[in-house]
Image: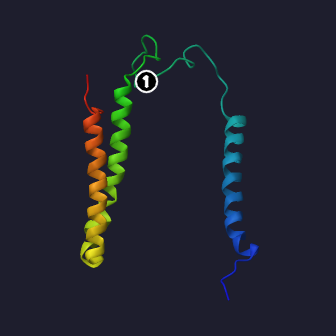
């Protein structure tokens, strides 16, 4: 016989979701109603670390900045997968070594591809 779940088994999860959503809605409504509503020219100005803003905030950034940031996140997440392997490599046996070798080959292939394409060259 298979392990069947009844709808009543999910009641605690649904209840937790309702309580969390209710808390969020209640908090947002309460802060909107009870919060101060004083608007002035000084209050509506942008404020950044005590320095008065100068010029246009919509200055375009180089696409290279975003490309390097995305590549950093991508490769940083891939490196995270190496930590559990390093901790458990003895218990994984030969299959773990082969799997990590395949992972490293794919990882380095992707890295060599972005190097070859010049994605990390800053001009």
Q: Give above or below for 2 relative to 52.
A: below
Q: Quadrant where the N terminus lies?
A: bottom right
Q: Give above or below for 114 relative to 50.
A: below
Q: List x then y, in percent, for residue 65.
A: 35, 29
Say which residue appears at 67% left-offset and 38% top-offset: 31
Residue placed farthest to the bottom in the image?
1
Residue 16 falls in image quadrant? bottom right
Q: Give above or below for 101 relative to 39.
A: below
Looking at the rendered structure, the secondary structure element under dot 1 is: loop
Q: Quadrant where the C terminus lies?
A: top left
Tell whether 116 sits left or right of 59.
left
Q: Work out whether residue 34 or residue 70 is closer to the camera in this orientation and state it.
A: 70
Q: List x then y, in percent, for residue 88.
A: 28, 73
Q: Work out whether residue 96 or residue 59 is closer to the camera in this orientation and state it.
A: 96
Q: How packed is label 1: few (under 14 Cα within 10 Å), some, or many (20 or more)?
A: few
Q: Which residue is mark 1?
A: 48
Say which residue appears at 69% left-offset and 35% top-offset: 32
């Amino acid at each position: 016989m298979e392990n069947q779940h009844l709808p009543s088994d999910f009641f605690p999860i649904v209840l937790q979701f309702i309580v969390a959503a209710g808390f969020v809605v209640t908090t947002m409504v309460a802060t909107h109603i009870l919060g101060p509503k004083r608007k002035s020219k000084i209050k509506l100005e942008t404020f950044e670390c005590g320095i008065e803003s100068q010029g246009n905030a919509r200055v375009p950034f180089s696409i290279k900045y975003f490309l390097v940031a995305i590549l950093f996140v991508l490769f940083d997440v891939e490196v995270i997968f190496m930590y559990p392997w390093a901790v458990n490599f003895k218990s994984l046996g030969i299959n773990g070594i082969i799997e990590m070798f395949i992972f490293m080959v794919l990882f380095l292939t992707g890295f060599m591809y972005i190097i070859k394409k010049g994605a990390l060259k800053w001009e």
